[in-house]
Each structure stands twice: as C-alpha cells, then as structure tokens.
Image: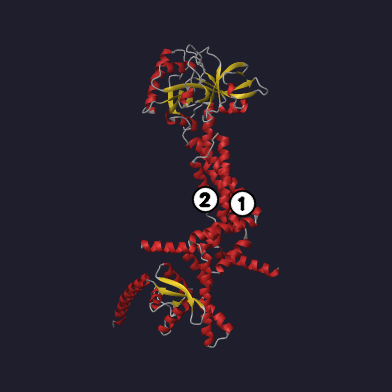
Amino acid sequence: MPKQPESGDLLQGTLDMLILKTLNRGSLHGYAIAEFIHQTSEDVLKVEEGALYPALHRLELRGLLASDWGISENNRRAKFYKLTKAGRKALAEQAARWNRVSTAIVRVMGTA
Amino acid sequence: MLAEWMNILWRRSKVLLRRRQLDRDLNDELQFHFAMREQKLQEEGSTAEEAHYSARRQFGNATEVKEANREMWGFALLETVWQDLCYGLRQSRRSPGFTAAAIITLALGIGATMGIFAVFNAVLLQPLPYPDSDRIVQISTQRCEGCGSSVSVPMFVYWQENNPGFEDLAAYQIGASVNLSGGDNPELVDAIEASKNYFRLFGANPILGRTFTAAEDRPGGPRVLVMSYGLWQRRFGGDPSILGSTITLEGLPYSVIGILSPAFQSYPRADVWVPLQADPNSTNQAHSLIVDGRLPSGVTLARANSWMEAIGKRYVQSHPQQLGGDGKLKVTTLQQQITGKRPPGFTDPDGRRLAGIANRLRQRSESTAGASRKAAKRNCASNRCWREPDTHCSSTAHRESLACPRWRGIRFGAGRVGSTGSVDARPGLLSAWAASRSRLNARSLDNRVRGCSRCSHCSSVWPFPGPPAFTNGLGLSAQGFGRSGGRQLET
C-alpha cells in the first residue's frame, strides 16, 4: 500500500531550496539544518533525516555547497556546510521561482 | 550545463582515490547526527536506551543512505560492476567443481556452435582464397537437361585453341591417390594432373623452384611434379635439396621442380601436381577434366555463356565423333560450384559431395548451433543462478532486507554469471579454432567467426541474471533466507 503523505512532509523538490536558504545564514551541520527547518516552520515542516544527507551531498557534488570539518557546540567533531557562490545564485533562482509559484497558488486558492 | 558536469566529474575523480575516507566521513557524520538526536531525546525525558533506538528509527535506513551516498560520489556503475565480477569470481572459487562443469559445458556448447559456424562460414560465406576469385568460372557440359558433367581432353584442347577470352584457362583431373615410394614408409598421396595455367589461375606460387613450363605440359614431356608445402614439411622435413631430385610415384621417377607456398589451399586438397599433358590429337571421349578459367574484367556470366554456346556448336560440327550433349555448355562461378548453388542434378561426384555438405550445413547449422547453445546455456547459466539455493537465495533475501534495488540484484547476478561466462568464452573460441583448423585448413578465425562467438556467448550467459532477482515473487528468496538461518541455528 502506498504511503499516505503526512501533513508535515516537505513538498517534493523543496528540500534543496530549504537547505540552501538555511545555510544562507552561515555554516551549519546536518543536524542543525534539520532542526532549524523544523523549528522555524513552527513544527510544520519535518525534514526526513534519511533524505537530508543525500540531499546535502548532492548539493555539495553540484558545487552549491562546500563542507569542512569543525567542532560543534557540544565539542563534537561535525561536518559543517556552507553556501558557495554558485549556491547563492541557485538559491536566488529557486527562491524567485518559489515566490512566483506560491503567489499563483495563493491567488487560485483565494478565489471564492 | 557542460561546465557543471565537468565540475561534478572532477569532484568525483578526486573522491575516487579516497573512497574509504568518504565512507568514514559519512559514518562520522551520521554518528554525530545520532548523538545529537539522542542528546535531545534524553533532554526531553527518554532513557539512554530509548533515545538510542528512537534516534535510529527516526532516521530510517542508514545503510540505504550510505549506499546512495557512495553511488552519488563514485563512478557507481564501474565500481559495482567490478565488485560484482569479483564476487562472481569468489563464488566460482568456492565451488570449483561446479565452476569447472559450467565452464566445460559452455565450452562444449559454444565450441560446437562455433565449429559448425566456422565450417559454414568458410564454405558458404567466405570468398574462395584465390586471386579475383569472383571471376573464376567453371565450364561444364550439360549432357542432359539439368545435369552437368566434366569435360573430355579433345573438348579442352578445342576450347584452348579457340579461347574466346577466358584468362588462364586451365584443366585438371582430380581424385587420384598415387603411391609415393622410395623411402622407408611408402604412402598414398593425393595427386592432381593439371595443365600449366592451373597455378597462375589459382595464385599457387612456388616458394621454391617453379611450376610447369609449356614444354613440360606437352604430350611426351618430362615427368616432373610440384609438391605441396605440407608434404614437403611432413615427408621431407622441409629439406630444400629435394628440389631437382627424383621421387617415385606409382613406380615411375618424377623430378621435383617446385614447392608451393603454404598459403595456397587447393580444392580439392592435394599433395602433388603432375602435368596434364593433354594430347591435341586425342580422341578420348572420357569426360574426366574440370576446366576453370578467369573471366576478363567486365565480362558477365551471361556473355561467357553465349561465348561457350557458340563454341559448343562449332565443336559439334567439327568433331562429328563426339558424344551427345558435348555442344551444350554451361559457365558458372567456381564459388557457386563449391557451395552447391549449382544447376539441379549436377553429377560430378566430388561436387555432389560438397553440394551435399553445403546443403546439410545450411539446413542444420542454425538448428544444431541453436540447440547446442541452448543446451549449454540451460545446463550452465541457469544452473549457476538457480541451483545454488543456499548461497544465492539467502544472499538475495539479505540484499532485499537491506532495500537493495531489484535492478542491482540483476546486475549482481550478471556479475556472477558473467565472471564465469567470460572465462567460458576462451575454451569456446579455442574449440572453434580447432574445428576450423582441422576441417578447413584455416590458420586463424576471421572476424565473422569471432563475432558469432561473441553473440553465441552473450546469448548463452547474459539473459540469465534476470530471473533470480525476481524470485521474491515466488517466495524462493524468503525460503532460502529461512533455510540458511535455520542451519545457522542448528549448528
């Protein structure tokens, strides 16, 4: 039986954009990225952790993210990701597209 | 877009040399994630054990994430193909008896297929190994409707004297086995009586000495012979001093004047050639000669037939003593004669035999080759996949429990079959080469035979990795998993 989508599941294709947006604030490790999205969306958006790391590595492979090992807030060794120049450009493009689409959806849904 | 792909390729190349580091880094990264999640859960009131398991449940299948990551960074296809081949070789090593049986079965199957195809190829598909072989024709009599026959000496002499344009018109008589004596071991050798143009027509060049002169080919000429390279090597050890010496054929002395090149393959096979010495005054009506010649460039077979039709009529008028039917002549290409595409009912004894071989080959090659190949692949490739339940089914079940994609399972099976199959192709090719050499005197396999070998090999082994990957639908992998697990518990 196919899995029913839950209310907190991310829309397909938006995870990359949310990761890029989250990292726009500065470098973060994977766990922090998931937590930031979860908390900022006031517990509405819940990142599938199993999908987060492949997404991070895919963005890194495409050159949109760079990574470096560092020490976390609780003194553990952690991998920190940050946006590259290409990543910022991609974020701008994706955000613009998202705005267009979401505005259109709001307009449609706002009709009587 | 291209630049992005180049960048991706460059990053992958960098990682390729430090794959283990990549695995360790991902492992560390996930461990950090679990630790952070556990810490948060404990802060929310879970026990350490509950937090440990809950963090992993929440994350999902970490192995799948690692696998996806490896494939993303690596040259996944190349790497997994290599891994599958290695795994296949390890499996083969674990069951050497089974592997040997598989290799021998496939070798026999592919070898039989290739042997048949090699003969088929050499007899029917390859051009004859003579210069301008497509222009070499055979002239025969049509003594009755639909039947063909060889030629008498007076006919050949007349054709020679009134040659309308055939190049290197030559006659030869085959089928004589003569007694070669004079040494410790007398033996029967195959002889051909040939007119002097025979050697130029078939491009039979001597590597030592010469071939017949016109004087030697006249009636009453000296007894000379030309020897094949094979007989020279076998009987006389390649001794060049044989040239000019005398050997005894049928109790008569013959002077050796030449040794032919090993590249020359006569049809039919022969060891010695002696001059035909056709007598212009002969009235012998025995039809014992085969007459071949080369069409001049640009002359069609139809035109050659019209030439010979006219000559046949003139011959009948000038030779009233001839047998009925000597005026009806037919020109066909030598290739057609040899491969059996001849006029129906051609009665030349050797020709009929070859035509029979060609026809049988045509009829049976596909069915026999197909059957032997099918038998081999049934007995081997499928066995390899299906009849090792303990290792195969349990490993299938393990892979599926780790969410291994089905296509990966197919490729996994391909590695197992292919690793054995790649080995199997070598004995198959060897068998084909042996068959080709023994039956056709060929010294190497041509590309067509090699191509057929590859196709035969591929169709024998490669379709079979698929079915085991779908055995889950039949409940086989689950059984295998259970059985394997049961045995482990018992021991």
Helix, strand or loop status at disc 2: helix
Residue at the extreme bottom of the image, as rendered? B45
Chain ID at mark 2: B
As measured in the structure, the alpha-carbon distance from the residue carrying label 1 to the one carrying label 2 is: 15 Å
Q: Earlier in the sequence, mark 1 or mark 2?
A: 1
Residue position marked by numbered label 2 in the rendering:
B459
- Measuring from the top left, give residue B2's x and y in whole percent: 36, 61
Residue position marked by numbered label 1 in the rendering:
B102
Report if residue B475 is visible in the image: no
Determine whether B399 is above or below B221 in the image. Answer: below
Helix, strand or loop status at disc 1: helix
- Could you say which disc has been placed on residue B281 in the image? none
Q: Dividing the image into 4 quarters, which one contains the C terminus of chain B? A: bottom right
Report if residue B430 is visible in the image: yes
| Residues packed near mark 2 inside 10 Å, few (<14), some (14 to 19) or many (20 plus) | some
Nearer to the camera, A110 or A15 = A15
Circle 2: residue type:
Ser
- Measuring from the top left, give residue A32's x and y in whole percent: 45, 80
Circle 1: residue type:
Ala
